[in-house]
Image: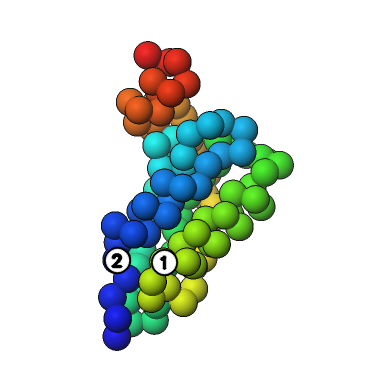
């Protein structure tokens, strides 16, 4: 079975942006886990959103599934939204904080 390149999956996630914040979801600290199953060609992303009830949740999920689905050897991508632990700005990278003028 062909392997899924983890770096390409992470690059795809870096191309996904929160529609209300001009920073990618990885640097925002929204991605909690990425599970790659090479045998089945599946990627499962566990992530959160900046707010419970985010009206843009569907768009964020669709973009993640679409971008990861374009990675070579990926046959299926599923996204699981969790609020445990809850997101906070402490999860953001320094780059994200600089981008948003928080540093």
Rate crowding at label 2 as few (under 14), some (14 to 19) or many (20 or more) other CA atoms within 10 Å: some
Please indicate whether residue 66 sits to the left or right of residue 88 in the image.
Answer: right
Image position of 67 with respect to 20: above or below = below
Residue 46 horizontal side relative to residue 54, left or right = left
| Residue 7 x %, y % | 29, 57
Please say if 75 is above or below 21.
Answer: below
Q: Is residue 68 above or below residue 58?
A: below
Residue found at the very far right of the displayed protein? 55
Front residue of this view, candidates 45 and 15: 15
Is label 1 in a helix, a strand or a loop?
loop
Any part of residue 48 in sight: yes
Please tell me in which quadrant of the rendered image residue 74 appears: bottom left
Judged from this view, the residue extending furthest toward the bottom is: 1
Residue 84 in view:
no
- Give the class, few, some or many, for how many residues have Cα within 10 Å of label 1's Cα (few <14, many ≥20): some
Query: Whole-percent x and y of residue 30?
Result: 46, 42
Q: Are marks 2 and 1 in contact (CB under 8 Å)?
A: yes
- Residue depicted at x 50% and y 47%: 16
Residue bearing mark 1:
71
Classify residue 5 by image quadrant.
bottom left
Residue drawn at x 66%, y 40% is 54
Scheme by which the image is coloured: rainbow
Please, what secondary structure does the residue beneath circle 2 have?
A: loop
| Disc assigned to residue 5 | 2
Q: Residue at x 48, y 34 (%)?
A: 23
Residue at x-position 53% and y-position 32%: 22
Quadrant of the image occupied by residue 34: bottom left
Question: Where the C terminus falls, by quadrant?
Answer: top left
User: Spatial distance from mark 2 to mark 1, Cα to Cα?
Assistant: 8 Å
In this rendering, the answer to whether 96 lies above or below 12 is above
On the image, the x and y values in percent for residue 58 come to 66, 52
Q: Earlier in the sequence, mark 2 or mark 1?
A: 2
């Amino acid at each position: 079975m062909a392997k899924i390149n983890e770096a390409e999956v992470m690059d795809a996630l870096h191309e996904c942006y929160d529609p209300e914040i001009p920073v990618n979801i990885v640097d925002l600290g929204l991605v909690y886990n990425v599970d790659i199953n090479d045998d089945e060609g599946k990627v499962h992303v566990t992530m959160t959103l900046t707010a419970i009830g985010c009206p843009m949740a569907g768009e964020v999920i669709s973009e993640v599934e679409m971008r990861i689905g374009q990675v070579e050897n990926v046959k299926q991508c599923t996204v699981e939204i969790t609020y445990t632990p809850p997101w906070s700005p402490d999860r953001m990278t320094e780059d994200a904080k600089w981008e948003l003028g928080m540093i």
